[in-house]
Amino acid sequence: MFRQILQSSVRTLLERPNIIRLGFLTLFCFSIVRLYYIVYYFNNILIWKYESWVQISDALMYFISTLNNHHAMWSVIIAVIVIIVWYLWLYPIGQAAVVNALHYPEKSSTTVFFKGVNRFFPMLEYGGLSIPFWLFTFFTVIIRLDLMDVLSNGLVEAMVWIWWLMVILASVLWQYVVIIISLEGCQVFDAIKKSTKIAFSNITLSIQLMLVELVLLLRFLITWAIIVWIPLWLVYIAIWLDIMNNSFVEWTIWVIWWILLFLLSYINCIIETFFLTYWYKAYIAITKNEE
């Protein structure tokens, strides 16, 4: 069943590009926020552990001064507000909309989007409840603790291992919650109970799909690490050649940076949509077998 689910999910996304477009429109700002956290912690590791790189506050001040010189500060402030609102509101709606698009292939994107809107509050509630159990949250906190040099403390280490166990359990047992809320309209705790029961009774399949998710996330991080070095090396080369103050060079670097940001966000949206697709396929296959 495992291979059939993955193959069917890939085939669905290839045959129905509207699902990827729907995912991109609703998950884009979620991807930007995730990329920001990756940059922030990567920057801190290089500074505090290896005493290299540039303080992110210095980079931010350079960014602000550049925008002031071009009279674009208000545009950026508005863009930040849009990203925050988009992240908080459209991400939970987008998840439910993608699941409904998979379940109702005959429905238009507008129709499934409003189905997602109808599931906004339970999806938002579940999103807030599950944040401490995200793998991404766990690893970012571990990095923070490592930067604070407290991981060697016995009590902290014990708590980290307990938390890691809880994250693993939630990552396997709660994966069907979004599908259940989106399709059945259950309340959050009822959906968690049902998801736990389904995942536990199909534990091998759930673990296999979770491992695929983990591998794809790690591959995305590696891809990000490779791509993000492109504008950074361009900056180093421009400084070395003493042409950083040239307006053409400056704008070229900015354009390349935004193109790469868009590309990385798009890749992340495809990955997130693929996750939703194969968990949906697994849920449908399991419920059909139970019938």
Image (spheres, rainbow, N blue to C red):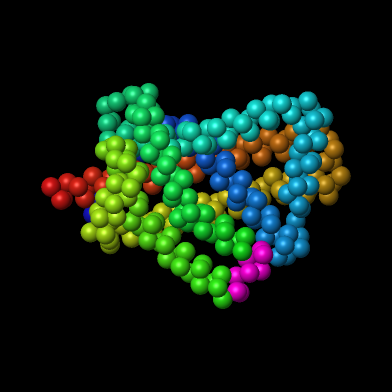
Outermost left residue? 291
**Residue extending furthest toward the bottom:** 154
Q: Using the rendered view, name the quadrant where residue 36 is placed.
A: top right
31 sits to left or right of 289:
right
Rendering coords of residue 162 (x, y %): 46, 68
Residue at (68, 30) in percent of width and height:
77
Residue 76 shows up from this direction: yes
Name the residue rendered at 66%, 39% in the picture: 257
Front residue (pair 85, 101): 85
Q: Residue 115 at x, y = what percent? A: 34, 29
Residue 20 appears in view: no
Residue 275 covered by magenta stretch = no
In which quadrant of the rendered image does the N terminus lie?
bottom left
Quarter occupied by residue 41 = bottom right
Residue 8 position, x and y percent, is: 28, 45
Q: Main secondary structure of the magenta part?
A: loop
Q: Is residue 284 left or right of residue 32?
A: left
Please name whichever residue, 68 or 137, is drawn nearer the observer in this view of the structure. 137
Q: Which residues are the magenta region? A: 146-153
- Residue 204 locus on image (x, y percent): 28, 62
Extreme-right residue of the structure: 242
Relative vertical location of residue 135 with respect to residue 179 in this rendering, above or below: below
Above-or-below relation of 15 to 207:
above
- Which residue is at a point 78% across and 41% down the rendered structure image? 61
Left or right: residue 192 compared with residue 90:
left
Q: Nearer the viewer, residue 278 or 230?
A: 278
Write the residue at 79% across / 27% down. 70
Left or right of 14 in this view: 50: right
**How many numbered marks appear?**
0
